[in-house]
Every structure is written in structure tokens, then in C-alpha cells.
Image (spheres, rainbow, N blue to C red):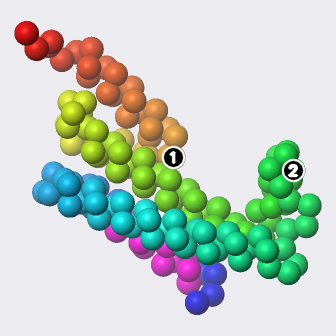
Amino acid sequence: MNLEQIFSAMNLLAMAGWLCLAAAPLRRPIMIAAARVVAALLSLAYVVLIYRGLTAPGGPEGGGFGSLAAVMILLSTPAAMLPGWIHYLCFDLWVGTWQVEDAPKAGVPHWLLLPILALTFMFGPAGLLAYLVARFVLARVRPKAA
């Protein structure tokens, strides 16, 4: 498989996980577990690809985590960038699984969770922030149990 094919396969795999989360009210525990299996598979692909991308001959010379310029160098090759992309797919999906698992306990209805999941899918930290705000607001608005 070449890098473009791996990229496409990882995107399709991640989308399957997100569809499970969108359908969570049907069978919440099973759908969350399925999405977490997808995240685990993405993690496995990440580990393999990050090792290959950062240790391959002709890799990004001078790259590192000490400065923005070094990170840009580190991710300057397709072989190093692909696992970076998978990193996003995996972690955003994992945050989504937590949101779906936590929502019933926090009183966040699924209809409100769906646009938050879309935001998490597209803009990870913004979706997490939206969920945390919704959770906070709903906790303050709900009547307290006697």
C-alpha cells in the first residue's frame, strides 16, 4: 500500500468510528466500543508509520519538537506527515467516544451532542470546548434532585 492508499484507508476507518458515535443511541455501549476499536487500530497504524517515517533514510533532517521551525521540518515529508494526520484522527475520535459515553450522565441530549461531535471531528479542541461548555451550562440549568 502506498501512502495515499493508507491515507484513504485511515480516513474511511475513522469515518466508520464517527458513524458509530452518531448512531450511539441505538446501542450506546456497543457503538462506543466499536469506535474505540477503530481508535485502537488507528493507534496501531500510527505507531508503525511514525517509526517508519521518522527512521527512514532521507527523513526530515533537523526536525524535532524544540521549536515551530523544527516541527515544520519534522512534518515536511509525506512519510512523517501521514502519521501526524492519523494522530489527529485517533485522538479526536477518542475524545468523541468520551463525549458519547459521558453525555447521558451529564444530561447532554444526543440531538445536542451531534453538532458537537461534528465540531470535534472537524476541529478537535473546539469540539471538546463546546462539549465542556454544554455540559457546564446544562449542569447549572437542570433542577437539582431533592
Q: Which mark is residue 69?
A: 2
Horizontal and vertical percent for residue 94? Answer: 42, 52
Q: Residue at point 58% right, 59% down?
A: 87
Assign the C terminus to one quadrant of the image. top left
Q: Is residue 29 above or below residue 80?
A: above
Q: Is residue 55 left or right of residue 25?
A: right
Bounds of the magenta span? 5-16
Residue 77 lies in quadrant: bottom right
Q: Amino acid at mark 2?
A: Ala
| C-alpha separation, residue under disc 1 versus residue under disc 2 | 23 Å
Q: Which mark is residue 123?
A: 1
Horizontal and vertical percent for residue 78? Answer: 72, 73
Horizontal and vertical percent for residue 135? Answer: 32, 27
Q: Is residue 55 magenta?
A: no
Q: Is residue 65 above or below residue 87?
A: above
Residue 2 lies in quadrant: bottom right
Secondary-structure class at tag 2: helix
- First of labels 1, 2 by sequence position: 2
Q: Residue at point 41% right, 72% down?
A: 13
Q: Residue furthest top?
A: 146
Q: Is residue 133 above or below residue 93?
A: above
Horizontal and vertical percent for residue 126? Answer: 50, 38
Q: Residue furthest left?
A: 146
Judge depth for marks 1 and 2 and give the one in front. 2
Q: Residue at point 20% right, 37% down?
A: 104
Q: Is residue 52 left or right of residue 124?
A: right
